[in-house]
Image (spheres, rainbow, N blue to C red):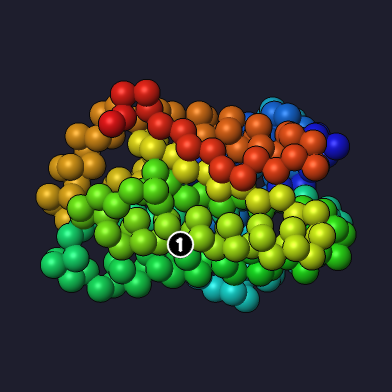
């Protein structure tokens, strides 16, 4: 089993990297379960996938709710009987210096980027451990490798994604559960991510960097590569930047 016939949950599937990943995996024969908050966008994507003969389902989910993430896993099992992989992709990047004290944005980033990802792992892990098979793909960032001014909290969340994924890898490998983990660390990718920056200084800096951004399909291909490897091969991390990104 490579990608074909695999059942893959994708959070943040309503735009950007999540949407591109659904198209890429679907085009390779995966059944994709689309999750995000904007139902209209999920429905549009499902209709478009259907035209390409790609099997998909969607569920409106806020990843900051553990209950909703558990329901997403159960929904997937009810639909398809198995979960082969989850792409914990939902995330937000409202950049601003700490001195701006945007406490609501700190809380949201921590809730979505860290807690949402943990709930995603927690929701699928029992099933994967029982099957002794599964793949957990977590979207970090180049910002999970280096801290940039204005990105202090965002970088903190993306460093956390890498720490959590590596801890998960070691725990599951030690118990022989055959669960693959992959950290995907993109550089600048042309999506809606920068649109949510409310701080004008940070927005100007991001807009300058995003001039060289690469399309989300570049990241989707890397995710497909990791999933498509044989089950005894874990691609533990991939960094993908625009060639021109310093
Ligand atoms: P987008 O803004 O296009 O996509 C973000 C997705 O996250 C949307 O589908 C959004 O859906 C979803 N989302 C946000 N909050 C929630 C929530 N509470 N519950 C469920 N879904 C939520 O940006 P990207 O595609 O760029 O971002 C995807 C991931 O890639 C993020 O984790 C981001 O940090 C990471 N990344 C992006 C980079 C880039 O340059 N674009 C670089 C490095 C990493 P909805 O609003 O419908 O809920």
- Examine the image and state in which quarter residue 208 appears: top left
Residue 202 in the image: state x and y as whole percent.
18, 50
- Which quadrant of the structure image shows residue 44? top right
* Pointer 1 residue: 160
Q: Residue 104: give x, y in percent of width and height.
A: 28, 72
Quarter of the image with the C terminus in it: top left
Residue 234 horizontal side relative to residue 166, left or right: right
Q: Quadrant of residue 126?
A: bottom right
Residue at left 79%, top 65%? 175
Q: Which sits in the foreground, 182 or 10? A: 182
Does mark 1 have its CB less than 8 Å from ligand 1? no
Residue at 70% x, 43% y is 234
Is residue 37 something one can see in this rendering? no
246 with respect to 70 (left or right): left
**The N terminus lies in quadrant:** top right
Residue 212 in picture, x, y percent from top left: 30, 27
| Residue 183 can be seen, yes or no | yes
Q: Residue furthest bottom?
A: 67
- SS state under label 1: helix
Q: Nearer the viewer, residue 145 or 139?
A: 145
At label 1, counting other C-alpha atoms closer than 10 Å, the crowd grade (few under 14, some 14-19, many 20 or more) is some
The residue under the point 36% across, 61% down is 156
The vertical placement of 33 against 113, above or below, is above
């Amino acid at each position: 089993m490579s990608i074909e016939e695999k059942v893959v949950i994708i959070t943040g599937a309503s735009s950007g990297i999540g949407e591109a990943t659904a198209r890429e995996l679907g085009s390779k024969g995966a059944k994709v379960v689309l999750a995000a908050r904007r139902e209209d966008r999920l429905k549009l994507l499902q209709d478009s996938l259907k035209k390409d003969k790609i099997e998909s389902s969607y569920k409106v989910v806020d990843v900051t709710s553990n209950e909703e993430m558990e329901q997403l896993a159960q929904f997937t099992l009810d639909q398809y009987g198995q979960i082969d992989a989850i792409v914990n992709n939902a995330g937000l990047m409202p950049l601003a210096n700490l001195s701006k004290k945007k406490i609501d944005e700190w809380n949201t980033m921590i809730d979505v980027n860290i807690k949402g990802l943990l709930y995603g792992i927690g929701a699928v892990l029992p099933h994967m451990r029982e099957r002794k098979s599964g793949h957990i793909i977590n979207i970090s960032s180049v910002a999970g490798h280096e801290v940039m001014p204005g990105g202090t909290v965002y970088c903190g969340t993306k460093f956390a994604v890498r720490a959590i994924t590596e801890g998960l890898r070691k725990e599951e490998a030690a118990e022989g559960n055959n669960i693959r983990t992959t950290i995907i660390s993109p550089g600048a990718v042309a999506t809606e991510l920068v649109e949510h920056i409310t701080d004008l200084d940070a927005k100007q800096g991001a807009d300058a960097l995003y001039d060289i951004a690469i399309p989300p399909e570049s990241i989707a291909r890397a995710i497909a590569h990791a999933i498509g490897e044989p089950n005894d091969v874990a691609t533990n991390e991939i960094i993908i930047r625009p060639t021109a990104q310093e």
